[in-house]
Amino acid sequence: MGRGEEVEGGSTPLAQSANSVYNSTMKYKLTIIAAITIAAVFLGCKGNNGSLPGEVNFDKDASYALGLNIGASFRDGMTADNIYPILDEFLKGIKDGITDSNQRFSVEEARDKIDAAFTAATEQRKNDSIEKENAFLAENAKKPGINTTPSGLQYEIIILEDGPKPSEEDSVKVHYKGTLTDGTEFDSTDDAYPAEFGLNQVIKGWTEGLQLMSVGSKYKFYIPSSIGYGESGSVNPYTGQVIIPPFATLIFELELLEINPN
């Protein structure tokens, strides 16, 4: 996961950032759910109060089931995206939009308010992530055996061997395992198939950390997002699944096997 296509400040194996996917997915999901909800409310209101044309074609249980199903879908979307509107105001907005009466502001003004709310939520999520990372690194630095470099890279030595160390111009062969601070493993090499790459092709934390190691050594690195995947994080470009969240500290166990392997 520290390897991949070249990007500014390091490398990433993924084309889209976690932030961009989060924002586009969240807005798309809530927009679609809102559209379906409005359609469902429209169907449920037809013919019941005389304000809308048409006849009821869903009975009581079917109408309730439709609303229940859409409500559950909306709940799942809110939980996944951590977006929770004031329910009474949300339902009132749907009703006013359908009946085209008592509207608090225009549709254009409504879109501006929605955009502002998403922007505020994104900024809050960013600040929370930064605070969480800083707290983890500050606490981790106090542990016995942890060394910290000027860049903020933290490391501990598991196995120390004498011998040559790679430079930034070298390539290396390594075994590694990468986890998030909550213990989630996001990438690793197979025992039979170590990874090979140039030190100038990876994230800054790897480039710096591997130059501390001699062949045969094994280190554990705690890589701050500033020398990792930063504010962008990374996602699976095929599924959109977030693999590394924005502002994530990465923990890697790295074993240096060879320098400039054939």
Image (cartoon, rainbow, N blue to C red):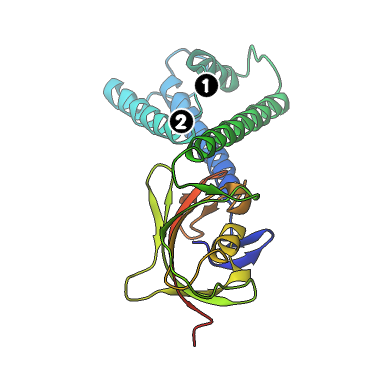
The extreme front residue here reads: 162
The residue at which mark 2 appears reads as 78
Residue 164, how many percent across, how many down? 53, 75
Q: Quick check: 192 left or right of 226? A: left
Q: How many numbered circles are shown?
A: 2
When asked about the image quadrant of residue 94, the answer is: top right
Residue in front for this viewpoint, 247 or 89: 247
Q: Which residue is mark 1?
A: 85
Residue 204 drawn at (x, y percent): 62, 59
User: Which residue occupies the foreground of this view, 13 or 42?
Assistant: 13
Q: Secondary structure at mark 2?
A: helix
Horizontally, residue 20 falls left or right of residue 46, namely right
Q: Nearer the viewer, residue 160 or 189?
A: 160
Comes first in the chain, label 1 or label 2: 2
Question: Residue 104: percent from the left, percent from the top?
Answer: 67, 14
- Kind of residue indicated by mark 1: Pro
Q: Are marks 1 and 2 in contact (CB under 8 Å)?
A: yes
Local crowd at mark 2 within 10 Å, few (<14), some, or many (≥20)?
Answer: some
10 Å crowding of disc 1: few (<14), some (14-19), many (20+): few
The three-letter code of the residue at mark 2 reads Met
- Measuring 57% from the left and 18% from the top, which residue is drawn there? 93
Above or below residue 250? Residue 261 is below
Give the residue displayed 39% in from the left and 27% down from the top: 71
